[in-house]
Each structure stands twice: as structure tokens, then as C-alpha cells.
Image: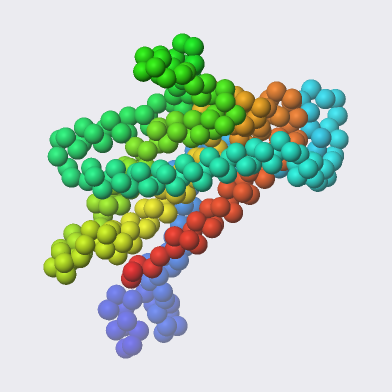
Amino acid sequence: MSAQASVRAGEPHTGTGAPTPSRAGVTAPARRRRARHFQPAWLFMAPSLIILGVFVIYPMLRSLQYSFYNWTVGAVSQEFAGAANYVKLFHDKQFWNALRVTLELTVVSVVLLIVLGLAAGLLLQRNTWAHRIVRSAFFFPTVVALSTMGIVWRFLLDPDIGIIGGLFSALGLPRVAWLQSEHLALPTVIFVYIWKYVGYAMILLLGGLNAVPRERYEAAQLDRASRWQTLRYITLPGIRPTMLFTSLILTIQSFEVFDLVYAMTTGGPVFHTDTLVNMLYRVGFTNFETGYASAISWVLFIIILAVSLLQLKFFRYDDVD
């Protein structure tokens, strides 16, 4: 009777009195195993992963290998050098000079870009048509290539044929050799770099400013907080994640700046604007010392990584803040 009741209930019967598993119960685990073995997401990710592997990861690993060889373009054999390139690097006066120039450019430009970008964002935060036009004017230099900007400013600052030199003469002032002076060349390059990217910093920080809840400002008005108190206790804590992102991006860009320096000064005068990437280019593509240039690139990578970690620690925040 129990077997007949089981059959009437729709359960398969094996003839031994015990019901067999349903069809769905047998095939579901198999389908789950097949799903684990094949993930369609990998098909969509495959093109990007291939490009990343071929053009990023593989060249990085090869450059790491080159840094341990006296690798020279065109040589019949490449001699293994161990850590000789890194030892040579830390005894190279040009490397320390390039590191100093890079750090000066990075620190000055990043600090001023964040300060000026934040000030411009606060002044142009309203969404009127006039503010939108001014924001567009600030952002316009960002879309132009650095090399193009460098060439344009090199002609503008030329003491003989430049427009700025002509304006100085019209005002009765002596012409200044901005890019030929050992004391003025680097500040001039930093000025042009800031002029180009201040709009970019403004747009990033403006997004953070617009994300701060309006209720906080309304509460500050009710408490009769001053503008400085509102900026210090509401605005700056509210845009801390945006400031972290902005400082990281600007720092990495500043450490890697090459085309602006190459177009304006090519590292001169007398290496006073010679950055690490400019030195890397000269060593690798002019002197064809690929192994030494690879060592420079990996030291630069380690420096950028260390500075980025310091920024992450400095700008750390809690969601409850």
C-alpha cells in the first residue's frame, strides 16, 4: 500500500519500496558544476585582459629582466649584471639631480593645483550659464596635448620673438630669458604645468563639492557658523575622498611628466629641468642603455608607489566622519 500511495503521489518507485530522486534533483548539481566550469564573463573580459597582458604586464616583466642586464640595443650578447645597474643608479649624480627636480615639480604643482582647483571650484560652484562658461574656459587647456602646450609656450616665452618679451619691451621692461635661465626655467615649467591642469583639478574637486549634502550647510547656517568654520568642518571633511583621488592622479601625472619638459627645455639649461622620465628617455633612446633605463623606470615605479601609499594614509577617512 505504501508503494502504491507513493506512485499515486507522483514519486518514482524503484520496486524496493524506496522512492528515487526526482529528475530535477539529479540534474541541478550537474548544471551548477557546468556553470562553475564556464563563466561567460571571461569571454567579455578576454579582449581587455589580452591587451593588458600584451601591452602592460609583459613589457613590465621584460623591463624588470632588462634591469638586471647590461642590455644594449644592437649588442650581439647581453651580459648579466645583477644589481649593478641599481648600484650605478644610486651613485649617479644626474639621477639625484633628476629626482630633486621631479620632487620639486611634483610637490609644488600638486599643492598649488589642489589649492587653486578648490578655490576655483568654490567660486564657480553655482550652475548659472556664466559660471558654466568660465568653468569651460578653465578646463579648455586640459584637452590640449602637453607637447603642443610646451611648443606654444616656448615661442611665447622666447626673449627675441616671443609675445611676452614684446610686451615687456612695450612697458619699458627688460626682456627675460625665462627658459634659458638656470633660476627661472623650472619655475616657468611648473607655472605652465599648473596653468594647464588647474581646470582638471577644479572639475574633480567640483564633483566632490556638489556631493556634500546640502543639509550640512543648512545646519551650519542655523548654528551661525562662519565661512571658515563651514569650510573647515563641513566642506573639507566632505570632499576628503575626492581630494585623495585628485592628489593621487596629479601626483602620478607629475612624476611622469615628460613631453612638456622635452618640448620647452629638453631638460636644460644644464639639467636644471631634467626630470626622471626625461633622463630615462635620454638614457634609453639616445644612449641605447636599455638595462640602465629599465632600472630607472623601476626605481621611479617604487617611488610613485611609496608616495601613493603615504597619500592614502594621510587622507584616510571613516564613513561616519
Q: Where the N terminus falls, by quadrant?
A: bottom left
Residue 37 in sight in this render: no
Residue 218 placement, left or right of 30: left
- At 66% from the left edge and 33% from the top edge, which residue is drawn? 280
**Quarter residue 173 falls in:** top left
Camera-nearest residue between 87 and 78: 87
**Quarter residue 10 falls in:** bottom left
- Residue 266, percent from left and from top: 60, 24
- Residue 189, percent from left and from top: 50, 31
Residue 47 in sight in this render: yes
Q: Furthest residue to the top?
A: 161
Identify whether 271 is placed above or below 30. above
- At 42% from the left edge and 36% from the top edge, which residue is drawn? 194
Residue 112 placement, left or right of 83: left
Residue 292 placement, left or right of 214: right
- Residue 212, percent from left and from top: 25, 58
- At 50% from the left edge and 40% from the top edge, which residue is drawn? 253
**Quarter residue 60 falls in:** top right
- Residue 90, percent from left and from top: 75, 45
Q: Where the C terminus falls, by quadrant?
A: bottom left
